[in-house]
Image: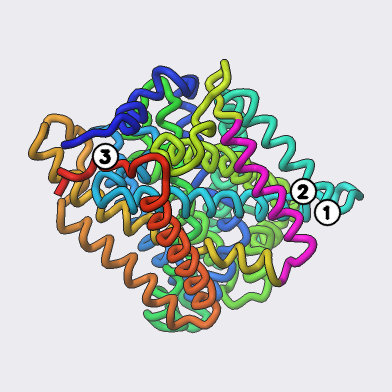
Amino acid sequence: MLESKSQLSSADEPRSGLARSLKTRHMTMIAIGGAIGAGLFVGSGAVIKTAGPAAILSYVLAGALVLCTLRMLGEMVVAKPRTGAFADYARMGIGPWAGFTLGWLYWYYYVIIIAVEAVAGAKILSVWVGLPLWIMAMLLMAVMTVTNLISVRWFGEFEFWFSGIKVAAIVSFIVLGLLWISGVWPGDTSGLSNLVSHGGFAPNGVGSILGAVVVVIFAFGGAEIVTIAAAESAEPAKSVARATTGVIWRIILFYVGSIFLVVCILPWNDASVLSSPYVAALDKLHIPGAGVIMNFVILTAVLSVLNSSIYTSSRMLRVLASHGDAPEWLVRTNSRGVPTRAVLASTVIGWISVVLAYIAPDSLFLFLVNSCGVVAIFMYVMIGVSELRVRRSIEREDPSKLTLKMWFFPYLTIVVIACFVLVLVAMLFDVDQRVQLLASVLSLVVVVVAYVLRKRFGRVPVDSEVAEVA
């Protein structure tokens, strides 16, 4: 296989540029924190309303697809470590255009998420603090930016504790829910009857289960961040192997287990389920201060995503720069191994987006959010295609590197890719999601056109490592 200078430097960077100060405990919590966001605590209500108690199956199916995708990614990371993770594997397996396209789409996605989470966090804090929303949003962004500028160790510590709070909250909810179902908790219990007593287990039909998968897929987004963080860990192969298997099983258990308990405690068609299912469930158990407790947990989830969004966008921007797809000065790190320029460049877009969220929340900002909404699905499809080709090249070159393998290769990989394509097709037939899909396709077209211009007029030659992978 041909390897360019930029690709070689990308592989060597963890020893010379970025610091390797993330420990296994950090990596574990980064994986959990990336996948468990505010969407579980708030957005799950819409899923339950769509599929009824059968929402449990929607979470199982979506979790299985994401688990398989991360298994593919873990296989490539362990066999061929790269600081750019999936963007570099798209470059290797599909071509330079794929690495460019996926890298920039992913960066764009996370710089918009920075603003989304800052605004969401400000709305929660405004209940407790009497400051204007825009000031609160700016303060949250400033705190998380400084955290990322100090060192990657600080990012890891913040994510460790943020994720710890989320895990503690979910585990506590699961324990309380099990006690209630079994009749140990004080008060009347309906046991498992709510699973079937309000129109059946799938009151809206089997189609609603599959339709809800489209929504649930996005709830699991963020678990792949651990593969980017691997470049700054002391034991990247071990950390990624552990995070993309055992940790993801735990995440699925948290999602499925807690959703199962919500639909057991509450009738799926209860009005309170749509607004805040976990608060409603805790109220049913007569937990004092349920609303305040959940607002604190949701705020923690928001800050966790904000923290990891700044980290992820800056590292992806640095990877793009290492291939000549972004200005070279973004590659540089300071004495602590932090790519400060990439961090600041990413947060600048976040600051602008926060301003737009207040100036034009229902027009420009809404368009920005919609235009990156399906990037996760694009990413999953490209990871699958990349794994098909990279796996075969590894088998030809050195099969001993395949210490972590995708299950039932290549059949399961193909099935997973097909499922994600079906998700995209299904979005075309949903009025609400169609707008998001079309706006995201527009973003994809813009980035592909940018690659054509970069290839023709760029000063740095296009990276062509993957010429011999096919």
Residue farthest to the right, as pictured: 130
Displayed quadrant of residue 344? top right
Q: Is residue 56 magenta?
A: no
Q: CA distance from mark 1 to mark 3?
A: 43 Å
- Amino acid type indicated by mark 1: Leu
Mark 3 closeness class: few <14, some 14–19, many ≥20 residues within 10 Å: many
The reply to whether callout 1 and callout 3 are in contact (CB within 8 Å) is: no
Q: Is residue 205 left or right of residue 265?
A: left
Toward the top, the furthest residue is 335
Judge from the rendering whether residue 433 lies leftward or rightward of residue 460; answer left or right.
Answer: right
Q: At numbered mark 1, what does the secondary structure look like: helix, strand or loop?
A: helix
Q: What numbered label is drawn on residue 133?
A: 1
Residue at image coords 31%, 51%: 383
Q: Is residue 260 left or right of residue 239?
A: right
Residue pointed to by mark 3: 76
Q: Are marks 2 and 1 in contact (CB under 8 Å)?
A: yes
Q: Which residue is mark 2?
A: 137
Residue 335 position (above or below residue 440)? above
Give me the residue at 88% from left, 47% from top. 129
User: Where are the magenta residues, as a range?
Assistant: 341-362
Residue 394: x and y in percent read 15, 38
Residue 31 in sight here: no
* Residue drawn at 52 percent across, 63 percent down: 373
Other-residue count near label 1 (Cα within 10 Å), few / some / many at <14 / 14–19 / ≥20: many
- The three-letter code of the residue at mark 2 reads Ala
Whole-angstrom CA distance, mark 2 to mark 1, is: 6 Å
Q: Amino acid at mark 3?
A: Met
